Amino acid sequence: MTEALDILTQASLWAAVLRIATPLIFGTLGALLCERAGVLNLGIEGIMTLGAMVGWLSVYWGADLWTGLLCAALAGAIAGLLHAALTVPLGLSQHVSGLGITLLASSLTYYVYRLVVEQGSSPPTITPFQPLAIPGLSDIPFLGPALFAQTTPTYLAIALIAVTAYVLARTPLGLAVRMVGENPHAAEAQGIDPTRVRIGAVVAGSALMAVGGAYLTTSAFNSFFPTMIQGRGWVCIALVVFASWRPGRALAGALLFALFDAYQLRLQHVVGALVPYQLFLMVPYVMSIAALVVMARRARVPQALMQPYRRGER
Amino acid sequence: MRLERRAHVPLGLAIAAPFAAVLVALLLAGLLIAAAGADVLEAYRRLAIGAFGSRLSLTETLTRATPLMLTGLAAAVAFRAKLWNIGAEGQFYLGALAAAAVGASGLGLPSAIGIPILMAAGALAGMLLLLGPLLLRLRFGVDEVVTTLLLNFIVLLFVSMMVEGPLRDPTAFGWPQSVPVEAAYKLPKLLPRSRLHIGLAIAVAAAVLLFIVQSRTVFGFESRAAGHSPAAARFAGISLSGTLVKVALISGGLAGLAGAIEVTGLKGYVTTDLSPGYGYSGIVVAMLAGLNPIGVVVTALFVAAVFVGADGMSRAMGIPSFIADVIVALSLLTMLVALLLVGYRVRK
């Protein structure tokens, strides 16, 4: 029992929490941005898969790591543009279109990966991002190695939370995004073009999702393998509800989630002989469902979420 | 440019839509085949041969279409009532596991009694699995898309736990697979010297039955009304939650049945790679069919042919067989657009 509690005092656990949370932060922020503008983006699972592969492949073909992330973001933006085109001007079912994007983006990813890497060969590796110790802060005992010796994309993710929160709450652009998500008719009356704002939000959000995927191949690991996203996209969709569509709470949700995940990984070593490992692996998915149930009634859903907007139509 | 709803949808247009959608999907996938440096027409010729070119390939396509028909029906019946069941994959696995567990428990029943019991066990498991997310939606307002998706991962881990634990076959040389069901419970073959089993007949019968239920019964009307306009349905005195529960029982039951049939029709035991995504492909099958149960039989054959044919094409030409998944995913998106063009007119 004390062993199970000792885990919580290891600096490596807290370092792992931030590492596990990073792709979730990118993904949740991306999904949140789409949904605040009124578009559910179930393409997230496929877009993260695509981003993971494109990020890795760009670096494998000689680009530097940041260019790799940029290429991933671009690929995600293109997939997002497709989803936006189908759901915003055409007003097609956001559920079905999103699932279609996930099926298309992931199968396309596997197809291209197989063209580059032959079946049966071991996945080629790249040199990933190295931890960047923040001078001064990383020397603090316990807290230093736990929080301030991450790779740069992790710091970027946390900074993006603040930027998104600021833009959404305090800028005209953020107000426009929120308005088209709450009441596109009122937005239009104010001279805002709901179609353009929604498309922009979905494209930007999808780019963020893809960067979350690319973090896995360029920082957390050093290669790509199929099925590596493992439902992280769906977890992000649940985290958006848990966060009640607020960026700050999304950070808290992602960290809480990552804490459980990192903890169960370590707990496996302690009690692994007694409990089947699959039960531990179920924890993230069970937690996501639990989070949905707890928050569903309390959350402030964007009022126009999943409602297509056609000018002059009610 | 704007879209204007057609007052009357021409029948010819509605029938042409899936064909046009598939054609465009094949054209787009052709670009990817060309990008791989292969001859596109030769590739599609190989695909057709791989799917229909011999007795073996034809029976293989029909065998592969069987679970797709059932998961396609599961999606079609649910989507018509706007119940977004994306959990057919999990329901398939839980149905397979339930059938395998009952079939290997040493009951020693004759085939005529044992097989229906196994089918019922599979269907029941699928039903129960979908009732959970539906209850969460009705009681707490939780979107069933995300919960059914998340449950797919939980169920697959549960299956993995069972085939490595209590249900593990000790004679399988260390492979994680369940104890095979008794020989009496294996489904009879439809054709000798093939893998094709009577599951195909069951799937087609289910499609016909569902078509009749949907077009000729009060429940069929209620489920359509629930999907089309919940407010109007409520005004007409239809219990929305009661209708959705019935829809969920049918949808989950069909997906669970698919799993039970796949186990008893083919290998007789469960592994964690029993389904190459039948649950997800079923969504495409249902959408291509315009959610029509009879159409599902046809579109399941198409999707199965793409998968089986792509294997042959991949072996012959070195194109990754993932091209099949790309074609199927593209078909879903092009079909969505085609359905829009059928229902709406584009006005300048």
Image (cartoon, coloured by chain):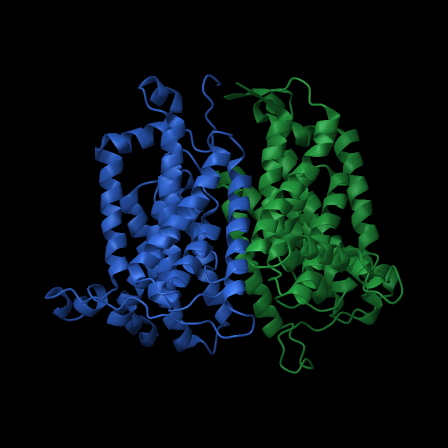
Chain colours: A blue, B green
Give x and y (percent) for residue A130.
Answer: 26, 69
Camera-side residue: A15 or B104? A15
Left or right: residue A10 compared with residue B317: left
Give residue A250's position: percent from left, percent from top. 32, 47
Residue at the image point whose x is 35% and y is 48% from the top: A208
How many numbered discs, if any?
0
Look at 51% across and 46% down and name the residue there.
Answer: A101
Q: Is residue B83 left or right of residue A86?
A: right
Of residue A194 and residue A27, the one placed in the foreground of this image is A194
Question: Against A159, is A97 above or below?
Answer: above
Residue A289 shows in this picture:
no
Rendering coords of residue A286 (x, y %)? 47, 56
**Residue that extends furthest to the left in the rendered view of this protein:** A136
- Residue A181 drawn at (x, y percent): 38, 31
Query: Can the viewer see residue B339?
Result: yes
Rendered image quadrant of residue B95:
bottom right
Q: Is residue A64 above or below residue B10?
A: below
**For residue B318, above or below residue A211:** below
Seen in the picture, residue A189 relative to B68 is either above or below; the reply is above
In percent of the image, x 67 and y 72: which residue is there? B178
Q: Nearer the viewer, residue A179 or B106?
A: A179
